[in-house]
Image (spheres, helix red, strand yellow):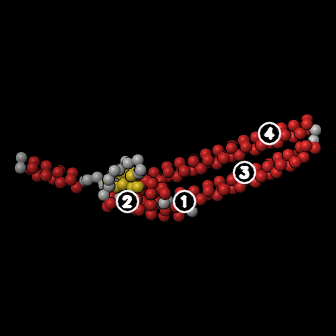
Amino acid sequence: MKKLPLILLTAMLAASCNQDKIAFVDNTKLIKEYQEKIDLENKYKVKFEKFQQKLDSSSAVLQQEIQSFQNSAQKMSQNKAQEKYNELMQKRQQLAQQFQNEEQLLSQESGQAVDSLVKKVRTFVKDYGKKNGYTYILAENEGGNVFYGENSKDITADVLRSLNTAYKEEK
């Protein structure tokens, strides 16, 4: 009977020593400052600029054809002028459709790359938590999952540093 209080005291001490290790990361900052995300943005910025240049160039060529047609249309028969006009309008429509499809594909590709990157970061944070003995790593973002967090519990900089180091090693 005398051992019962000692056993209870030992159990309570053991339970109090086994507290959860909790921290949080600022999702917005983590993604925004992740070097792979910055590289990805730059890659797609270049792709969109090339796309825009191609669009501008093709539009300028078509506009020259239309201008040339307008200058020579008065010298053509009405049927020939109408035929050439229809041909140019069809070409304009095909060009617009082609560029709309290309833009849509580029946007989808970019979106998929960002989605993949976000999944990669989530997996990294999960693995980081396991490796460093965290019970929970909460996400702070503009939506307000964490309304307040003590600065000492913010591990965003540590996770970001580890994430960027891992990315450099992949390259």
Label 3 vs 4, first from the N-terminus: 3
User: Comparing marks 2 and 4, which lies closer to the viewer?
Assistant: 4
Residue 90 — which label?
4
Q: Residue at x 66, y 56 (%)?
A: 49
User: Comparing marks 3 and 2, which lies closer to the viewer?
Assistant: 3
Q: Which image quarter: residue 79?
A: top right
Kindly identify which residue carries mark 3. 55
In the rendered image, the residue lying farthest to the front is 74
Q: Residues within 10 Å of mark 4 (few under 14, many from 20)?
A: few
**Which sits in the foreground, 72 or 100?**
72
C-alpha span from label 1 to label 3: 26 Å
C-alpha span from label 1 to label 4: 40 Å
Name which residue type carries label 2: Ile
Kindly identify which residue carries mark 2. 155
**Which sits in the foreground, 66 or 166?**
66
Name which residue type carries label 4: Gln
Q: Residue at x 77, y 52 (%)?
A: 60
Label 3 vs 2, first from the N-terminus: 3
Judged left or right of residue 5, residue 82 is right
Q: Which image quarter: residue 30?
A: bottom left
Residue 124 shows up from this direction: no
User: Comparing marks 1 and 4, which lies closer to the viewer?
Assistant: 4
Judged left or right of residue 152, residue 5 is left
| In the rendered image, the vertical position of residue 58 relative to residue 82, given as above or below | below
Q: Residue at x 64, y 44 (%)?
A: 104
Kindly identify which residue carries mark 1. 38
Residue 104 — which label?
none
User: Comparing marks 1 and 3, which lies closer to the viewer?
Assistant: 3
